[in-house]
Amino acid sequence: METLYTSRLHGFPNLSRAVSESPLTEESMLSLVIVLGSSVSLVGLVFAFITYSLFSDLRNLSGTALMNLLAALFMTQLLYVIGVGGVPDPELCIALAFSLQYIRSCVLCWMLVMAHHMYTQFSTNLHLTPITDNSIGKRFLRYSVFAWGLPAVLLGASVIVQYREKGGKILDTASLKEQNCWFLDKNAFIYGLILPSTLLALTTFSYLIRSALVARYVVNMQVDKKLRDKMKRKRKLQLLLFTKITLLLALIITLGALTKLIRSEILWISYHVGQGLQGIFVAMMVTCNCQVLKLYTRTFKSRGPRQGTSTFGNIVPSAKTLLGKGVSISKSTSLQLLTWDPTPDPV
């Protein structure tokens, strides 16, 4: 236990050096998998963020919320990599622990925002409530205040708990360095991250269930079979995507909680591997699906003889070409990250 918990996973620079000087061992292989996985995750998250920034069809309220989620996940992976080799400076160690606790809460808050927005859109289709551009801006502002502000409140509570637990010695980081400054001490970790994360995850799952019920009701209201099948397929893809991302994030938080409270080799290794690879998994789920690939293909096909040149010299399809190809640039706030056809009108 002691060698795995400290030497194997705490001394990454030594392990990396050992790879070139000696045959591959269990420790060096684990180090290699985690470092490579984290690097690939960072690249994947950047690619996903650029994808949702590039296409106008994805820059709606849902896509913007997803971009904020990707940005928070990127910061989580980056801070995780910073602590991999150990943090000798106590001030940097406590700053890293607090930063990670804040950004982990931001990730869960943005996931809750996305689930709430999906439920709102499904309910809008049910009640035929009109949505104006003004209401879209106000809603995103409320979402941003909640997703970035609530974690700041939780972080302040963690600082108070950590300060009181250490008797005023908040820079006493001996226990934090045992886990690479990724987690605060026990009480601050439980009350500042575990309990709020549990409530956020449960609330997200409740919105997913309610969205599924509303979507099923709306789909069954449709008379046309083709329209009904299309709406059912679209809603199912959206629900599955959000459910998979929520389950993955909840799993990583659970593994982190167990490794903090229970010193187990298997749990500690599982957390490292999961934390290192979660970014690439999320990036693949939101970009490497048939609908995003269809958007890429549609953009390439729309490049005909009539093409315009952007201010940066890049060739882009003209508006007339896009309209001639039947591309619909929608300004609605519906969840179009999985389909770029206009939302079917409910009965």
Image: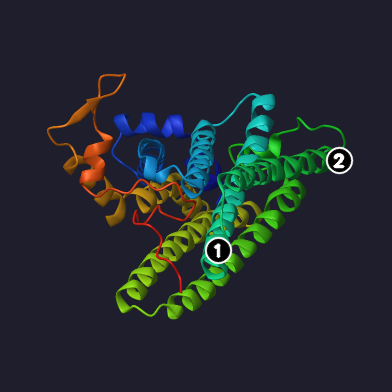
Q: Position of residue 14 (x, y in %)?
A: 44, 30
Q: Disc 1 vs disc 2: which is toward the camera?
A: 1
Which amino acid does the dot numbered 1 rest on? Thr
Q: Position of residue 314 (x, y in %)?
A: 25, 24
Q: Is residue 336 visible?
A: yes
Residue 268 placement, left or right of 286: right
Q: Nearer the viewer, residue 25 or 214?
A: 214
Task: Between residue 104 and residue 25, name the one nearer to us.
Answer: 104
Asked whether 178 or 205 is in front, the reply is: 205
Looking at the rendered structure, which numbered label has been put on residue 190? Answer: none
- In this image, 311 relative to 86: left or right? left
Q: How many angstroms separate mark 1 from mark 2 (CA)?
A: 47 Å
Q: Earlier in the sequence, mark 1 or mark 2?
A: 1
Under tag 2, what secondary structure?
helix
Q: Amino acid at mark 2?
A: Arg
Element under label 1? helix
Inspect this view and state whether residue 48 appears.
no
Residue picked out by circle 1: 124
Near mark 1 (Cα within 10 A), the count class, few <14, some 14-19 or many ≥20, is some
Q: Which residue is mark 2?
A: 164
Q: Which residue is rendered at x = 49% and y = 34% of the image?
A: 78
